Amino acid sequence: MLELVDVSAGYRGKTVVSGVSVSIPRGSWLAIIGPNGAGKSTLLKSIAGLVSYSGSVLLDGRPVQDLSARERARALGYAPQVPLLPEGLSVTSYALLGRTPHLGILAREGPHDMAVVDQVLARLDLSSLAGRLLRTLSGGERQRAVLARVLAQQTGVLLLDEPTTGLDIGHAQALLDLVDRLRTEDGTTVVSTLHDLTLAGQYADRLLLLDRGTVVASGDASAVLDASVLAQHYCARLVVMEGPDGKPVVVPKRRPIE
């Protein structure tokens, strides 16, 4: 159970996110959506403990800030939108960094850790790239490598900042399917930011719409992905239709040529 109570955060004295409260049950998926600059990434970093915040972030009733660094790394897996990748590491070596919280002091990775990483790479279609250096990968391949490291942590909570950035539709679907499977089979709790509103509505149990740092809508996809609400906060021309699975599909409308 992850709970945010009146969370506010910002940088250099400027408030970016203000008064966010939401409960995220174990094994559920919350997608944070909103226009550019709405505070989505800042809110995710607050949960991860990467920016200062006021209010409370609770994991099973315990303040996350009270966890030790090792406890936090075992509980929360965070994948940034723009990661800083170390030079000289292969995909496998980088993914193995995700096993660090599970190792003792001065201990090295063992067969179990290698098996976890091999399985994660296979799931993310990275097995053929296992020996490649990170700097030789395409943008989409690097994004999947970052997710491999996070998934190798085997945490109870995944915090994913725009996980489909740079991925084609096939790899984006495969990645989100994998995250969804972890959620349903292992009880993993997922909090992600997503620009693609249709994908957010298809995969998340609940959507949180931010604009200018405050919550303007919260609920299931049918409640939040309302054409008038989205048009107002995104300043966009769009229609919302029902997809083949009954979930809403957000379609942009071209401006008529006069």
Image (spheres, helix red, strand yellow):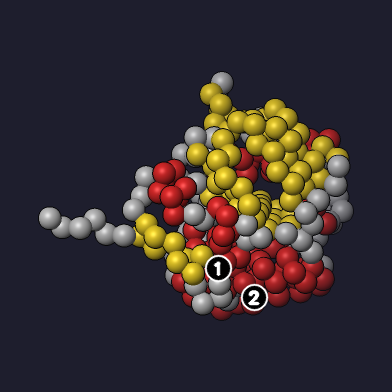
Which residue type carries mark 2? Arg
Whether residue 5 appears in this view of the structure is yes
Which of these two is toward me, 154 or 84? 154
Residue 208 position within the rendered picture, expressed as x and y whole percent measured from the top left: 60, 48
- Left or right: where 184 falls relative to 91: right
Which numbered disc covers residue 247?
A: 1
Q: Earlier in the sequence, mark 2 or mark 1?
A: 2
Q: Is residue 12 above or below residue 90?
A: above
Which residue type carries mark 1? Lys
Residue 9 position within the rendered picture, expressed as x and y whole percent measured from the top left: 62, 31
Q: Is residue 125 above or below residue 186?
A: below
Point out the image quarter for the C terminus. bottom left
- Left or right: where 79 falls relative to 66: left
Which numbered disc covers residue 123?
A: 2
Which secondary structure, mark 2? helix
Residue 124 position within the rendered picture, expressed as x and y whole percent measured from the top left: 60, 72
Which secondary structure, mark 1? loop
